Image (tube, rainbow, N blue to C red):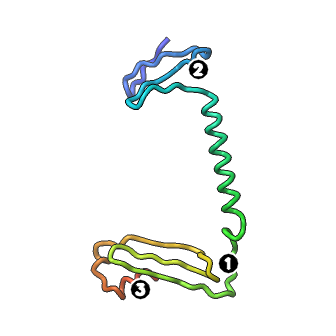
Amino acid sequence: MFALDLKSGDFQMAVNRSDIVKTAFVTKNGTYAFRQTQEILLVNRCAEAFDAVKAVVTKAPVLKLPDFKKPFELFTDGSSIGEGAVLNREQRRVVFASSKLSNAEKNYTVTEREYLAIV
């Protein structure tokens, strides 16, 4: 039994379940075979890596509610191609921001670019 994939025009043949482990495909980089155990290991590695990153990011002091009673410090910089800003509190970075200047904004003076970074 076969099927015709009308989108790409390829013939597709059904493969017995017992023969799936024997399937392979050839690319310009070489011949590759599908193995179920490799896919499971890859999924487990990805899940472990995601859990590790999630644990680091969600632990204090990375995520912390701001105390609005304490002052913030805003550092900005404008250059000929872009602008950036960093919001700090007590020597800790709260947020970063940056953007590329448009053609019209590239004609601004240095002082105007510095002000643009604040806005």
Rendering coords of residue 36 (x, y %):
62, 28
Q: Quadrant of residue 42?
A: top right
> For mark 1, does the 10 Å Cα neighbourhood hold few (<14), some (14 to 19), or many (20 or more) residues?
few
Say if mark 1 contacts mark 3, CB within 8 Å.
no
- Which residue is more in the foreground, 15 or 4? 15
Q: Quadrant of residue 80?
A: bottom left
Q: Residue at x 58, y 20 (%)?
A: 21
Q: Is residue 39 left or right of residue 111?
A: right
Residue picked out by circle 2:
21
Quarter holding the C terminus is: bottom left
Residue 24 in the image: above or below residue 89: above
Tag of residue 66: 1
Q: Is residue 11 left or right of residue 20?
A: left
Q: Residue at x 30, y 83 (%)?
A: 108
Q: Quadrant of residue 65?
A: bottom right
Q: Residue at x 67, y 78 (%)?
A: 66
